[in-house]
Image (tube, grey):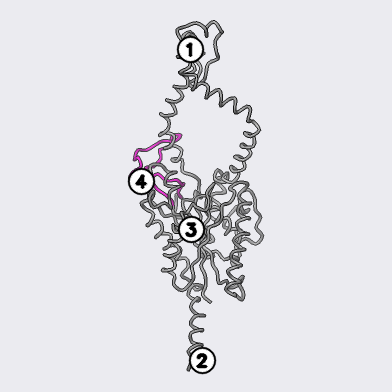
Amino acid sequence: MKKTLLIVFIHGFKGGDDTFGDKEGFTAQLRADLAALLPKINVNVLVYPKYETRGDLGDCVSRFRDWLLEKVIDLEVANNTPSPTVDPSVRVVLAGHSMGGIVAAETVIGLTSEKPIYSEDGVEKAADSSTATFNSLMFPYIQGVIAFDTPYLGISPGVVAHGAEGHYNTANAAMTQLSGLGTALWGAKQATSSPSRNRAPVAALPAPPANSSQQGGGWGWGKIAMVAGSAAAVAASAGAAYYNREHITQGLTWATSHLEFVGCLAKGAELQKRVQYMVKLNRELDVGFANLYTRLGKAAGSKEVSVVGTVLGRDRTFCNLPKRDNGGTWKQAVNDVATEETQAHMNMFEPKMNPGYDRLKEDAATLIAQWTRNEWYESSEEDKLAIKEAGESATA
């Protein structure tokens, strides 16, 4: 029986089946590279179908686990494995992009827990990870978790800081124009006669003056018409908001549900605990754990930005990085054409948008191959040799 390594890709927040490229893209190329590196076993690839990234994290993990169990059982049945739960012929590497990496980590933690309890933060964990005990007879058997730009320790403050700085001038100009639009539409007299202490903040539309003020002045209907289109857009937005308030309420419910899914990124203690669990799993059960994180390269600005008195470093990443070497394997994936962290994050698997695509694929294949070259892998040849010897003795 030739054993099988199954690579399962999990997309992140609002991702889909095309997150990792088309059928001939990253997933197929990585499979081919791994097949060359691991010739003793079969290498299969599955992409988790597009799922609703809403509700709490525990629900998402539970649904994924059920789906994975079904797929692995199908493979074990096809392989006629005598005791799949004790000596499986199939092992799995979970490959998650962004939030998909958190779903992957939580899945492993749940599979190795005696009685997993799923909550809004995933699998409930001991307050002290050092006291956690793991079940080595997990099924499906997870050989490793390889994450692609997963914010295991939260999203870097630089993602907001650099973006805010870049868009500030544009936003400020737009607000100033909007303020001027209000003054032009309602009459210049009010703007000049209002005391400075009562001046409305930038972008606040002043209330319309009395009818006599509107009728006087040098503004004619032609000039009013010139700005009416822009002002009407503002008024129309307000009107639409009122008349579609039921749809907006539904939208808020939709947004809140999605925020439940990504809300775990704001819980620092849970983030730290999840990483500590994965590090312990790596140490005690030899479950691989790595995060290939994006870093901006040559195209990004080199200036430093400060946030609340803290000067951010020049290395611009989407993810917060561990401060010490106790967070598993973290390896940078540099993108020399992306100018923003989110661009690098979303274009990891697009060769035209990521010059480091081939290096990313190579690093992923190398890590997975290292995790897989073990006693389970080597034993895959034993059955083939036995069959060959039996055939030779039969013809002798």
Q: Is residue 257 left or right of residue 216?
A: right
Q: Position of residue 279 (x, y in %)?
A: 51, 58
Q: Which residue is mark 4?
A: 337
Amino acid under disc 1: Trp
Q: Is residue 183 visible?
A: no
Q: Which residue is mark 2?
A: 394
Distance Cα–Cα, label 4 vs label 2: 62 Å
Amino acid under disc 2: Ala
Q: Is mark 4 in CB contact (under 8 Å) with mark 2?
A: no
Foreground pick, 291 / 54? 54
Callout 3 secondary element: strand
Q: Earlier in the sequence, mark 3 or mark 2?
A: 3
Distance Cα–Cα, label 3 vs label 2: 45 Å
Residue at 44% x, 22% y is 177
Q: Is mark 3 in CB contact (under 8 Å) with mark 2?
A: no
Amino acid under disc 3: Ile
